[in-house]
Image: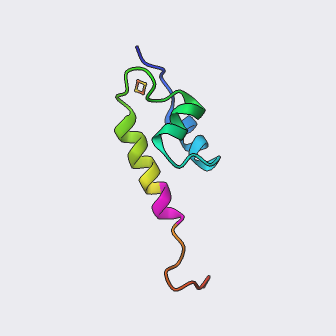
Amino acid sequence: MCNFVTEREILSAIRNGAVSLRDVTEMTGAGESCGRCKTVIENMLKEASVNVEPNPQGRLF
Ligand code: FES
């Protein structure tokens, strides 16, 4: 059985503060049943964290 959580719902959870698979599962139910989406969720989390990494030089521009 699968919870059929959409990519949009997962992205929304990440935008609302989810930083781990556990967070996403708690917020959306994704990965709770069949678990086939776990790798996809982890990749989405990695991609999101890359996008929010601070500038290593600490400058805004
Ligand atoms: S719980 Fe089935 S694909 Fe995520």
- Of residue 33 and residue 7, the one placed in the foreground of this image is 33
Considering only vertical position in the picture, is 58 above or below 42? below
Does residue 46 appear to the left or right of 17 in the view shown?
left
Does residue 35 appear to the left or right of 16 in the view shown?
left
Q: Position of residue 7 (x, y in %)?
A: 49, 37
Does residue 20 appear to the left or right of 61 in the view shown?
left
Q: Position of residue 16 (x, y in %)?
A: 65, 46
Q: Main secondary structure of the magenta part?
A: helix
Considering only vertical position in the picture, is 17 above or below 51? above
Which residue extends farthest top?
Answer: 1
Q: Residue at point 53% right, 49% down?
A: 19
Q: Residue at point 49% right, 55% down?
A: 48
Magenta includes 50? yes
Q: Position of residue 41 (x, y in %)?
A: 43, 41
Q: Quadrant of the N terminus?
A: top left
Q: Residue at point 46% right, 63% down?
A: 50
Q: Position of residue 61 (x, y in %)?
A: 60, 85
Considering only vertical position in the picture, is 27 above or below 44? above
Q: Residue at point 51% right, 68% down?
A: 53
Considering only vertical position in the picture, is 16 above or below 8? below
For the magenta stretch, what is the residue range?
48-52
Instruction: For ligand 1, give the image quadrant.
Output: top left
- Of residue 60 and residue 18, the one placed in the foreground of this image is 18
- Of residue 51 and residue 21, the one placed in the foreground of this image is 21
Which residue extends farthest right?
Answer: 16
